[in-house]
Amino acid sequence: MTEDKSPPRTFKGLLGWAITPPQAWGVYLLAVLLVWLLSFYSGTLKPKNAPNASPPMVTAPKS
């Protein structure tokens, strides 16, 4: 068996890999899809308690 002498992966190395042209398109599309999914999910959430609607205040008497 051969011993692997490569250094462990670091965040800087992963970032350098992610910003090269072929991978950058995939990373960009994945980020756009993730943002869309999160915004869609948050838009479908319903509030637990709806605030009570109070009648509007009367400012002038009706004649």
Image (cartoon, grey):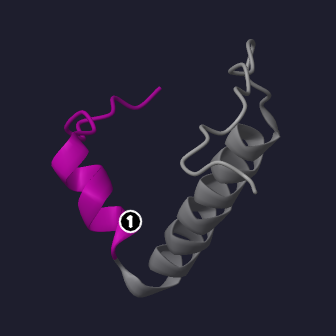
Q: Residue at x 38, y 65 (%)?
A: 18
Q: Position of residue 36 (x, y in %)?
A: 67, 60
Q: Residue at x 33, y 34 (%)?
A: 4
Q: Is residue 6 above or below residue 13?
A: above
Please name whichever residue, 35 or 14, is drawn nearer the observer in this view of the structure: 35
Whether residue 39 sits left or right of residue 12 in the image: it is right
Q: Residue at x 61, y 72 (%)?
A: 29
Q: Is residue 18 above or below residue 60?
A: below
Whether residue 60 sits left or right of residue 15 in the image: it is right
- Image quarter (top left, top right, bottom left or bottom right) of the C terminus: bottom right
Element type at mark 1: helix
Q: Position of residue 1 (x, y in %)?
A: 47, 26
Q: Position of residue 34 (x, y in %)?
A: 63, 53
Whether residue 18 sits left or right of residue 31 in the image: it is left
Residue 61 painted magenta: no
Which segment did they paint magenta? 1-19
Judging by the rendered image, the residue that carries numbered circle 1 is 18
Residue 18 painted magenta: yes
Q: Residue at x 65, y 45 (%)?
A: 38
Please name whichever residue, 5 or 23, is drawn nearer the observer in this view of the structure: 23
Q: Position of residue 33 (x, y in %)?
A: 67, 62
